[in-house]
Image (tube, coloured by chain):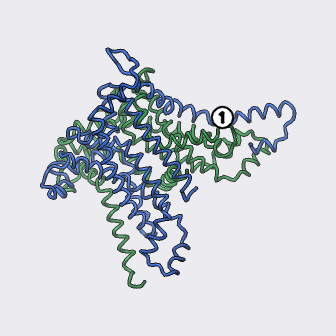
Chain colours: A blue, B green
Amino acid sequence: MYVVTEKTRARGWTRIFQQRSNQLYPYFLLAPALVLIGAVSLYPTLYSFYLALTSVRKGVMVFVGLDNFATILASRQFWHSLQLTLIFGAFYITLTMLISFILALIFNRGLSLGGLCMTLIFIPWVLSEITSGVMWRWMFYRDYGVLQRLIGPLFGNVTLIATPAGAMGIVTAASVWRSTAFTMLLLLAGLQTIPKEVYEAASIDGATKWQAFWKVTWPLLRPTTLVTVVFLSIQVVNAVGMFLAITEGGPGNATEVLPLHMYREAIQYFHFGYGAALSVIMFLINAVLAVVYIRALRSESVWS
Amino acid sequence: MMRRHWIMPALNILLLLIGLAFIFPVFYSVMTSLRAPGYGLSADIIPDSFYWGNYARLWSYGRFPRYILNSIIDALGGALLTCIAAAPAAYALARLHFKGRDPILWLILGMMMIPGLTNLIPLYKLASDLKLLSTYTIMILVFGAYGVPLGVWIMKGFFESIPRELEEAAAIDGATPFQTFLRIVVPISAPGLTATFLINFVYNWNNFITPLILISKTIMKTATVGLFDFQHALEGNQDELLAAACVVIMVPAIALFVTLRRYFLQGMIEGAVKG
């Protein structure tokens, strides 16, 4: 019901004409957005489901059914990449949440330098993955790297970026560095929705600050935490830029996470069918996470 | 409480140190970019003297100026397209009731949650079939589309906060709905449009994987893809030049964020938590 039309007192055919055009009006407004999303996101996604069932044999694209998926499930690299993605995700999510949570609690006290520090912490977030990657490689450069010199001695002076665990650690640290500010902002927004009266009531009841945190802050912030963790999980499944910029999957294939594996197969080796099948698998993981995310927002969120 | 006077100053100092640690890599690249040719990386953080010539060298290195121009065209075109497409759609979703409103809303929300990475391979194939690889057209279309879900979300929130009376008054004065939208609603939504434009401009400017896949011709590469090539060519031997390139790419995004921070933060919160 468009309020304006109720007020314009058109009669006869003009009224019918207006009603018609008013029925189409919303779709007219939506058309540019839907055409763009359809052409760039929806259609390619559907097309990838089709591509995933094909393979190029002797220069010709042929239908191969579920062969690509069978190949993927039988491939050691796929399971290796999936394992790497899970390891990366576990460390990345835990560290990002921990650091962001502490920062959010500090920022929530409304410090005088809060604005300035918020800007500083947000700067990594407005940098490109490739610029970040170049800078983090420098910090772990074998002879001069500032962090390599600082941390290297703790690990027997090995060049960290040249070891599998070190390389994964560096990409994880760089990713945490880039994501912390945004995650912190989500948690801070959650903290600020908790009314002051709740704390006052708790303190009247004789609760210590520590008790107030565990009995008030934490339960009220749990929905926000859930939303944030799912948000970060989506970042994990799609984390490719930092890996490309810092390790390119190396040393060997020690950091070839799932999306990097997909990129390599499809773009570097031109295995479109195989790459498309991988992207279908990743799309499905994303879709499940997106549904969880939307549900978390809808049903539990303190904002809705 | 008196004995806790030191807590706030201590937290301020702690927070400032954390903030400075966060921007250390940026500081380090600025310093590296100011070293004389051949003096690239060093364990000393601040060089003895500042050499500004790397920025001049960069101007004639490879096709760097062209990469910057390409980045500007792609990022600007994409962000504008996003605004043009997202604003009317958001208005329809905020104000009008029509068949299919809910499915469309879910579709857009879903698209916002799912990053574009998984459709880059089919997109590459389609662009290649349509002879659109390495063109401004494909980059602007893709960037434009990527921004639409977040743009719709930001603008929808904005439109919902505008009182309906304004539009009703315009309608009584005889304006058609579309005129009302263009002349009344859009102008007062300038802050929402600014947030949409800025966030998407910076996302596009920084985007690395999309142009890496969709652009193969050297002359059409964006600054981020150019930097990836520079990294392979220069790291370890001309780091001062590589650092200068990093700085040139970082500065516009940092400057926009620092000067217009509230638009960024407001828009991002809107996009991430208001389901």
- Viewer-proximal residue among A254 and B127: A254
Task: Specify whether A282 is left or right of B233.
Answer: right
Q: Of A28 and A183, which appears nearest the observer? A: A183
Query: Is residue A17 placed above or below A250 in the rendered structure?
Result: above
In x, y percent, where is residue B128? Answer: 41, 22
Residue for point 18% across, 58% down: A150
Within-10-Å neighbours for mark 1: few <14, some 14–19, many 20+: some
Nearest the viewer among B54 and A226 is A226
Q: Is residue B183 left or right of residue A285?
A: right
Q: Quadrant of the N terminus of chain B?
A: bottom left
Residue B242, placed above or below residue B126: below
Q: Residue at x 63, y 49 (%)?
A: B159
Residue B189 location, x and y as percent? Answer: 61, 48
Where residue B205 sits in the image (x, y, percent)?
A: 41, 41
Which quadrant of the figure has residue A208?
bottom left
Mark 1: which amino acid?
Tyr
Q: Secondary structure at mark 1?
A: helix
What subunit carries mark 1?
Answer: A
In which quarter of the view is residue A59 placed?
top left
Q: Which residue is mark 1?
A: A27
Q: Is residue A272 visible?
A: no
Residue at 56%, 52% in the rendered image: A298
Left or right: B275 in relation to B176: left
